[in-house]
Amino acid sequence: MTQPPNQPPQPGGFGAPQDQPPQQPQGGFGAPQTPPPPQTPPSGPPQPGYGYPQAPQAPQAPQPPQQPGPYGQQPAAGPYGQPQPGPYAQGPYAQGPYGRPGQSGPYGQPQQPGPYGQQPGYGYPQPQYPGAPGTPPPGSGSGNPFKGRPALVVAAAVAALAVIGGTVFALTSGGDDGDGKPVAQKSDDPKASASVSAPVNPGDGSGDGGADPENFNAGRQAGEAKVLWYKEAPDAPGSGADAPGMWITDKAAVKAAYKQVTAYNVGDGNPAWDPITLPQKVCAVTPQKSADDKIVVAYESGTSDRAKCNQLQQLDLNTGKKGWSTKIGDGALFDSAITISMSITGNTLMVGRSQSGVAYDLATGKKLYEKTKYGESCFPTAFAGGSKLISVASCDATGSNEHDEIQELDPATGKAKWTQKFDKGWTIARTYSLDPLVVYSTNKDKKAWNIAAFTSSGKFRSQVGFDEDFAPECGWAILQRDLQGCQGVAVDGNTLYLPTEATTGANEVVAINLANGKEKWRVKSPADESMLPMKVEGGKLIAYVEPSYDAGGQVVAIPTSGSGHKPVKLLQNPQSTAEIENGFYSKAFDWVDGRFYLSSTRLTGNDEAKEKLMLAFGK
């Protein structure tokens, strides 16, 4: 399958991005300068430089310890990033995770010293676009940028991905709001129309249930679930288009794609309300919905290369009614809205720019406050929302004390409840959970990753204490960090559930005790395909087993307590949809009220194929 044009930079040798990422700041307001134009990677073996592993060098003597941080003495880096005794010098991890590189971990996987080992390059999550060098095939996990290298002696006990915070762009003018009048209809109660014998309701992407001759239930084998309904994708440019987000309410399954937001009754797929067409393409959405089923979508200010992602529109998921709309302006110099992130916490919408955040009242659109530069030249560059509002800042970017900080904010006022400083060299990449807070981070120089849990007051609690290659499916983030861009990871109370990377055949899901970072149990996928955790319901972990070339995916339930953790099949998707499940360049999936929803998050724009947007499976 061909790779869609106009996509983000693809990984080259050892996972390094082909396009040159923005350079480090050269001065002025603590922000990096405008990124150079993309360059073609050199031919032949990877060359030293930004994003590529460096040539081996002679080991150097350990450096003197850094100044004490929040957890006491900082670790010094030894040859090839080998951790030295740090804050846990008297504990079990005094010499790193398993002594020195080369010593086997608990599952017989030796740690590889040196720059080439098995680590991909500089920290970008691998895009899920088939055909790119080093990109996994459809249906496989994206993997971690630093595989199997937990850093267990970092003073802040956390790590990070050196992605681009505070990127500088030329200031440009925005476009008009382009707010149109809402067209809304009441949706029917899906429970009245949902039935186990509901037929496939084909669609053409326009929301009118148009006739498409495909019937995925024809020839369905015994034990296979039904395709309750499916929808064709809307027309998209030949260069492709984003289709972010997927929201499921009691009434409607709602999807954004290109310039549209469409909704379908969850039971039968009939239109829940008339499609909303926006003036320009959707560029960001809130991954969460509010308690009263509201979301916000952002669309671009125009069609030129200078267009910004600065037009905000609130929507009601159940009625399709448009609420307030507004335009978010640029911040101070070098603080741009070319790209933004959005999240909802309670009744607060947080919109992240390149170096700050702006909070709005979700119900009215009234501006509440701005989260801007603070302390030691700390620029907030990413936010995560949901049960808590988390802010990540890049500090002292041009100085000798460059580091990341993470804060929990009061969503109503923006005031920091607590602040946790990370060690120099570690950059925060993802939040796997907000309550409890679980942070994934990496260190480019040490070629190491870390997964750490924190208490409700922001104190270090534990970190994953064993060597493993974990592979949740994480989206790509080029201009901004994407703190909430991972699927295939679940957290429930005291336990973190992560999928391992499948090298050949089935992978495993590992349950990790957040009290001490140790493994509780693990279970193998019931098929020769990767199993990805989704959520915990009723004491069971619900997971999606990805399809093979000749069998649809599965939804399974795994008991989280007791001595037995054997997956029990809840749904077996029909073989007729295996090609579609495998064919999505990237996807969103969810299990709600006994139905499995699967949608594409990237459209190819291929007019020769009837591209699917969304499917619903059930019994």
Image: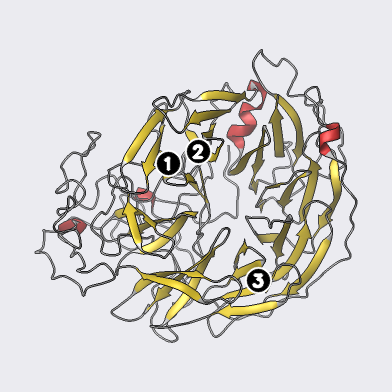
Whole-number angstrom distance, CA of label 3 to CA of label 1 = 36 Å
- 305 relative position to 540: left or right: right
Seen from this angle, which residue lies furthest left?
61
Q: Which quadrant: the C terminus?
A: top right
Q: Which residue is mark 2?
A: 533
| Residue 301 screen position, x and y as percent | 72, 71
Which mark is on residue 308? 3
Whole-number angstrom distance, CA of label 2 to CA of label 3 = 35 Å
Residue occupying the point 39% across, 48% down:
144
Whole-number angstrom distance, CA of label 2 to CA of label 1 = 7 Å
| Residue 311 screen position, x and y as percent | 72, 70
- 269 relative position to 116: left or right: right
Callout 1, which amino acid? Leu
The answer to whether the residue labelled 2 contacts the one labelled 1, judged by CB atoms less than 8 Å apart, is yes
Residue occupying the point 58% across, 22% down:
551
Residue occupying the point 65% across, 52% down:
244
Q: Disc 3 on helix, strand or loop? A: loop
Q: Which residue is mark 1?
A: 498
Residue occupying the point 14% across, 49% down:
100
Which of 37/555 is in front?
A: 555
| Residue 361 screen position, x and y as percent | 70, 72
| Residue 73 screen position, x and y as percent | 19, 69
Callout 2, which amino acid? Pro
Which of 259/433 is in front?
A: 433
Name the image quarter holding residue 66: bottom left
Q: Does residue 364 appear anywhere in the picture?
A: yes
Name the image quarter holding residue 143: top left
Q: Which quadrant: the N terminus?
A: top right
- Mark 2 Cα within 10 Å, few/some/many (few <14, many 20+)? many
Callout 3, which amino acid? Lys
Which of 533/313 is in front?
A: 533
